[in-house]
Image (cartoon, rainbow, N blue to C red):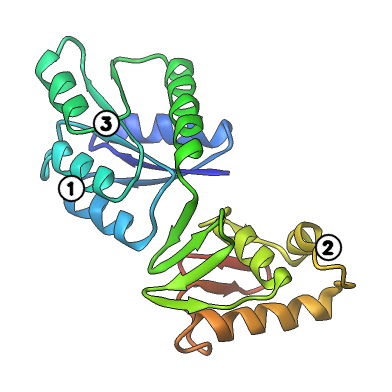
Amino acid sequence: MNHILLIEDDGAIVRTLTSFLHDEDFSVRTADGQAAAIALMEASAPDLALVDITLREGSGFAVCAYAKAHDIPVIFLTASGDEYSVVTGLDMGADDYIAKPFRPRELISRIRSVLRRAGKRQNTIKVQDLVIDTEKATVTRGTQPIYLSALEYRLLLVFANNRGRVLSRERLLEEIWDTAGDFVNDNTLTVYIKRLREKLEADPQNPRYIHTVRGMGYQMDGDRR
C-alpha cells in the first residue's frame, strides 16, 4: 500500500479525496497548512505528497521545497489557468500538477505514474530516523547501523510498507511465513517482534516505531491506542 500525504485546506475536498483514495487502496494522512505538513513529513516520509499551492496557513511552495529536498515525490494542485503556479512549481522540482476542478480518475492515473517513476530511482524507506535501504538490505537509525536477521528484516519491511495500518498477528504470519527457512508460529512471531524492538528501539518498553494495538495487532508509526 502506498502512503499519500494530502495538504489541502478545503475540508470538502479533503473528505471527498480521502474517501476516493482509500477506495483505490491508498492510505492517506492530511494536513491543512505548511507547518502541519512538514511536521508529518519529518515524522514519516510519505510515498507521495499532494500539495495545494494556495493554503490559508503558510505556502504550498514551501511544502513542495521541503518534500523535494527529502526525495518525496510531489503532485501539486492549482487553480485552473494559474500559469504562474504551474511554472513555479515545476521549476521547484514538482513531479506533476493537476488543475482544479480535476477528475478523480485522472488524479489517480497521475499519482500511479509518478509513483512508478519514483520507484525506479528510490531504494530507501524512511520511518522517523530509521532508514531502510532495500537495495543493500541495510537498516540504520541516524548514523548507527542496525543488524537484523533475515526474518527480522522481512518483518520490518512488512511494517514499513504498511505504515499507519494496524496489522493483525494472522496477517504478519502470512507475510513472513518460512521466509528464513524456519518454522514460524504465533509464539515465534512474539519472539521476533520482541527482538526487533530490542534492536530498533532506544527504550523497547516505550517503543517509538512499532506499537501494540490491544486486541487488534501492531502498528508502525501510528498513534498508540
Give the image quarter of residue 186.
bottom right
Q: Please name whichever residue, 116 or 188, is drawn nearer the observer in this view of the structure.
A: 116
Residue at the far right in the pictured view: 183
Q: Give the number of the mark in front: 1 or 2.
A: 2
Residue at the spot x=14%, y=43% of the render?
62
Q: Check if mark 1's residue and mark 3's residue have beta carbons within 8 Å.
A: no
Tag 2: residue type? Trp
Label 2 neighbour load within 10 Å: few <14, some 14-19, many 20+: some
Residue at the spot x=50%, y=62% of the render?
132
Identify residue for label 3. Answer: 94
- Horizontal placement of 114 versus 205: left or right? left
Instruction: Say which label, 1 or 3, has the lower sequence index.
Output: 1
Identify residue for label 1. Answer: 34
Q: Please name whichever residue, 216 or 113, is drawn nearer the observer in this view of the structure.
A: 113
Give the CA separation, mark 1 to mark 2: 42 Å
Position of 141 relative to 171 (above/below)? below
Q: Please name whichever residue, 37 or 93, is drawn nearer the observer in this view of the structure.
A: 93
Instruction: Say which label, 1 or 2, has the lower sequence index.
Output: 1
Q: Check if mark 2's residue and mark 3's residue have beta carbons within 8 Å.
A: no
Give the image quarter of residue 58.
top left
Identify residue for label 2. Answer: 177
Total count of labels = 3
Task: Give how far across and how far down residue 205 sits, in percent.
Answer: 52, 90
Q: Secondary structure at mark 1?
A: helix
Instruction: Say which label, 2 or 3, has the lower sequence index.
Output: 3
Tag 3: residue type? Ala
Give the image quarter of residue 118.
top left
Residue at the far front in the pictured view: 136
Which quadrant is home to the N terminus?
Answer: top right
Give the CA separation, mark 2 to mark 3: 40 Å
